[in-house]
Image (tube, helix red, strand yellow):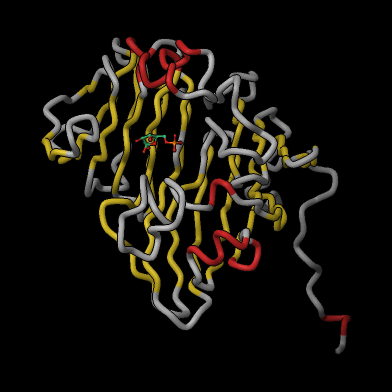
Amino acid sequence: MDRSNKPSAIGVSPSLPQPTISFRENTVEATLPTGESVIVNLYGATVTSWKLANGDEQLFLSEKAHLDGSKPIRGGIPVVFPVFGPPPENHATSLLPQHGFARNSNWEFLGKSSSESLGKDRKDCDDSVKLDFGLSHSMLSEEFRKAWPYEFGLVYSVTLTKGALETSLQVQNKGSQNFEFKTLLHTYLNVDDISNIRIKNLQSKTYVDKTQNATSHTEASSALPITQETDRVYQALDPKVPIVISTADGKDLFSITREMMTDVVVWNPWAEKAKGMADFAPDDAYKKMICVEAGSVSTWQTLEAGDSWEGGQSIRPKA
Ligand code: TA6
């Protein structure tokens, strides 16, 4: 090849401040030059920390969360796949645990990529980093392989930017049989006081209330307060319309948009259920967390042999 005419590779200038990536035991940590950071535990590819440049932690993590791979992590963003909730009887997922195997399997770190920072819109530093994690059938425990014998591949991407945290899941059917799945990003958000938050853009939406025998209801509130155990699956939401968590006096705390994930679960265990969970601590921590969970859980997604599906969320913290 005549290399004299080969264009010089467009790379990231080494002089620009770059995101740093560090590995500690079973975790990957990324920090932007501006200070934002994220920690991902390879067990479940569970995001366990997301801090803003000022060090404020955005995610709730139980003080008794198991971080050693012995149990699904209580807090952060557990990945739910291929089933949401207790698996149904007489179904391909029947033998799997609640919320499936993704959150209690060891994933592998596939690598990182950072934003292009050169060219006419040169920025002062690399302002984003994407971490990719993988899980495939051969990596599962024998128990899970037997329980759900489909050739699949998952790639979970965690993208940290100055203004948001984005997590997305690509599901690949690498086998010769169709399979069906449900998936959800079980996000535990930190709040100062559960009694002072309101959840917006749910009004008039249909939801299944799991605290009322999974009966169907229509949301009447334009600013939903959380005053008791809450476990609702809101269905068929426009993923581009943000779910906004704000304070009672209207200050936005979080805004969550989605891709392909048209259901949103709102969960708070409240006092009694919190006390009943051995890995939920301290007992009154329900006052400082709310789960707002983007997912595709109301119906089964059927993935044909060779096909793939991708969905995800983008969480913007308070300005
Ligand atoms: O997403 C809400 C939910 O399905 C609740 O019903 C509750 O079970 C919660 O998940 C926690 O489930 P886990 O299996 O993590 O204890």
| Horizontal and vertical percent position of residue 107 | 65, 53
Q: How many marks?
A: 0
The image shows residue 71, relative to residue 84, as above or below, that is above
Q: Is residue 124 left or right of residue 146?
A: right
> Which of the two residues, 143 or 108, is positioned nearer the viewer here?
143
Compared with residue 30, is residue 190 higher up or lower down, i.e. above or below? above
Q: Residue at x 24, y 46 (%)?
A: 237
- Whether 300 is drawn above or below 160: the answer is below
Quadrant of residue 191 in the image?
top left
Ligand 1: give its quadrant: top left
Q: Is residue 215 left or right of residue 311?
A: left
* Front residue of 268 and 95: 95
Q: Residue at x 37, y 14 (%)?
A: 271
> Which percent across, then down, holds residue 269?
36, 23
* Position of the N terminus by quadrant: bottom right
Q: Is residue 197 left or right of residue 139?
A: left
Q: Residue at x 53, y 52 (%)?
A: 102
x and y percentages locating residue 32 in the rendered image: 70, 35
Nearer to the camera, 121 or 17:
17
From this viewpoint, which residue is outermost toward the bottom?
1
Residue 210 appears in view? yes
Q: Is residue 225 above or below residue 120?
A: above
Q: Residue 228: give x, y in percent of width and height.
A: 27, 17
Q: Is residue 120 visible?
A: no
For the point 40% across and 54% down, the residue is 83
